[in-house]
């Protein structure tokens, strides 16, 4: 999950004034019915809700990862405004689409204030908020009522994230917007975490 959360957060660093989004890749564990997120793919930093681009991206990602026994298991989103910590309608709609195909899907929302506090050394708490569907089929913040079943390796992910931010590794991140503008740019970012 280190690559996943670090990649999501680094995408925000590349575009300071726009909402950004991406999808979570993983599988459902056969042992304990837990969703294991193993990767994330940054999607867009402009026109994040544009349906044709989104459909192309989802098809390409699903095709690539299904060959590896993985699938799209969720969605991540970072709002445009620094103080906005609410799920947007675009995030909910994309999450709903993914949920139709993967009922255990989750949404991760980046908390911009926590990301800034992390880079200043003031806070080590998770920079992502986890949302899942509740019994009324609405997206609900997990753990808001003390019922969180979320298990992360977040402290180590935060250390890795801080290293990537301080070394400006985020400048090399390619999202699907970049790939659609120039197909020589690889949306898989194979060299980014080496």
Image (cartoon, grey):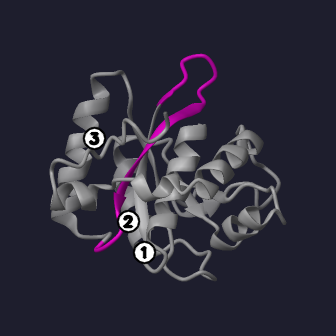
Q: Which residue is label 3 attached to?
A: 61
* Label 3: element kind: helix
Q: Are marks 1 and 2 in contact (CB under 8 Å)?
A: yes
Q: Which is more N-terminal, label 3 or label 1?
A: 3
- How many numbered dots are placed on residues in this image? 3
> How would you rate the neighbour count of disc 3 (Cα within 10 Å): few for under 14, some for 14-19, many for 20 or more?
some
Label 1 SS: helix
Pointer 2 residue: 93
From where the camera sits, is residue 181 visible? yes
Q: Earlier in the sequence, mark 2 or mark 3?
A: 3
Task: Give the residue at x 59% y 27%.
Answer: 33
Q: Is residue 32 magenta?
A: yes
The relative height of residue 100 versus residue 92 in the rendered view (above or below) is above
The image position of residue 34, as x and y in percent, is 60, 30
Q: CA distance from mark 1 to mark 3?
A: 23 Å
Residue displayed at 20% across by 44% down: 59
The answer to whether residue 134 is visible is: no
The magenta region covers: 27-47
For label 1, count other residues whose C-alpha is less than 10 Å away and answer few (under 14), some (14-19) or many (20+): few
- The picture places residue 105, in percent across and down from the top left corner, at 48, 45
Give above or below for 123 relative to 27. below
Residue with the mark numbered 1: 89
Work out whether residue 5 or residue 100 is closer to the camera in this orientation and state it.
5
Q: CA distance from mark 2 to mark 3?
A: 18 Å
Marks 1 and 2, how far apart at CA:
6 Å
Q: Nearer the viewer, residue 81 or 130?
A: 81
The residue depicted at 50 percent of the width and 49 percent of the height is: 7
Residues marked 2 and 3 touching at CB (< 8 Å): no
């Amino acid at each position: 999950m280190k690559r996943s959360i670090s990649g999501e957060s680094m995408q925000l660093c590349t575009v300071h004034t726009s909402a950004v989004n991406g999808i979570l890749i993983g599988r459902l564990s056969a042992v304990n019915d837990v969703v294991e997120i193993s990767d994330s793919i940054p999607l867009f930093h402009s026109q994040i809700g544009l349906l044709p681009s989104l459909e192309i991206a989802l098809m390409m990602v699903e095709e690539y990862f299904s060959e590896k026994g993985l699938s799209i298991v969720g969605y991540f989103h970072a709002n445009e405004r620094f103080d906005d910590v609410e799920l947007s309608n675009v995030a909910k709609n994309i999450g709903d689409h993914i949920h139709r195909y993967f009922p255990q899907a989750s949404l991760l929302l980046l908390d911009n204030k926590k990301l800034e506090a992390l880079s200043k050394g003031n806070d080590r708490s998770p920079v992502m908020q986890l949302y899942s569907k509740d019994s009324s089929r609405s997206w609900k913040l997990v753990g808001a009522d003390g019922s969180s079943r979320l298990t992360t390796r977040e402290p180590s992910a935060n250390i890795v994230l801080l290293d990537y931010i301080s070394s400006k590794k985020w400048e090399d991140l390619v999202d699907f917007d970049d790939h659609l503008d120039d197909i020589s740019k690889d949306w898989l970012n194979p060299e980014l975490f080496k």
